[in-house]
Amino acid sequence: MDTTDLETYQVQLSQVELALQTDTENAGLLSLRSELQELISLTQQSLAQAASSSRTDAVRKTANSTPSHTWTAGSDCLAKYSGDGNWYPARITSVGGSAENPVYSIMFKGYNTTELIKGSEIKALPANHQEKVSAPSKRKLTKAEDEERDRKKKRNEKKLEVKAAKAKEQLAKQATWQKFAKKSEKKGVHIAGVAGTSIFKTPDNPLGRGAYRFSLFERRLLDF
């Protein structure tokens, strides 16, 4: 039954009422009027019940859509990740939007990923969350996160290569000097600073000044 049926019954009743004005004792019209009045009453009751049920459903939907938990900045929760639709531990960093339709800025724990999500994409942590913290579920890195990780890895590898090259160069210089010192000793040339003597010690032989100049030359080679 709907409003169209009700309107039909009411029109029919008015026609019967009009006919009874000229034939007030007509048993058929009196019976029809009674039936129509009963139909109109039943239809009105049915429509009232349907309207009440609709209002109840609307209130229930509103209650279900309204978050039962009040989330604030700093709250820990489970949030739905847009990348795969799964739920991960997160922390709310800020709350925006309106009171009726709040928007939450969250950061997933263990990642630097932040997202803006609605209340329907947040839920409370499970009771056994402490056990899960020790072995949190891992989600796949986004393309940007994966590329950033590769860039950091390459930068670290480059730094290690530079350090290794410098160490190798230093070792080569030391080996060159040691080779030069050994050749000089074989030729009878004393290199000051190698055998523990000072390059500034005044020699006792007549060629002292020349020996001093040669020692300075050797010192420059050592610095090189």
Image (tube, rainbow, N blue to C red):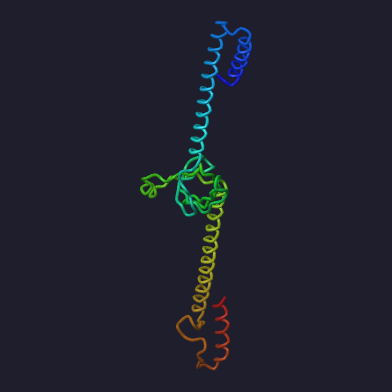
Q: Nearer the viewer, residue 161 or 122?
A: 122
Q: Nearer the viewer, residue 118 or 21?
A: 21
Q: Is residue 148 above or below residue 4?
A: below
Q: Residue at x 50, y 36 (%)?
A: 59
Q: How many marks?
A: 0
Q: Residue at x 63, y 12 (%)?
A: 18
Instruction: From the top left corner, tell me how far across and down residue 79 is, in percent.
Output: 48, 45
Q: Residue at x 38, y 47 (%)?
A: 129
Q: Nearer the viewer, residue 43 or 114?
A: 43
Quadrant placement of the N terminus: top right
Residue 165, picture quadrant: bottom right
Quadrant placement of the C terminus: bottom right
Instruction: From the top left corner, tell me how far across and down residue 186 is, in percent.
Output: 49, 77
Q: In this image, 137 relative to 205: left or right?
A: left
Q: Nearer the viewer, residue 3 or 177?
A: 3
Q: Is residue 139 above or below residue 9?
A: below
Q: Residue at x 50, y 83 (%)?
A: 192
Q: Is residue 113 above or below residue 66?
A: below
Instruction: From the top left corner, tell me how far across and down residue 130 is, in percent.
Output: 37, 49
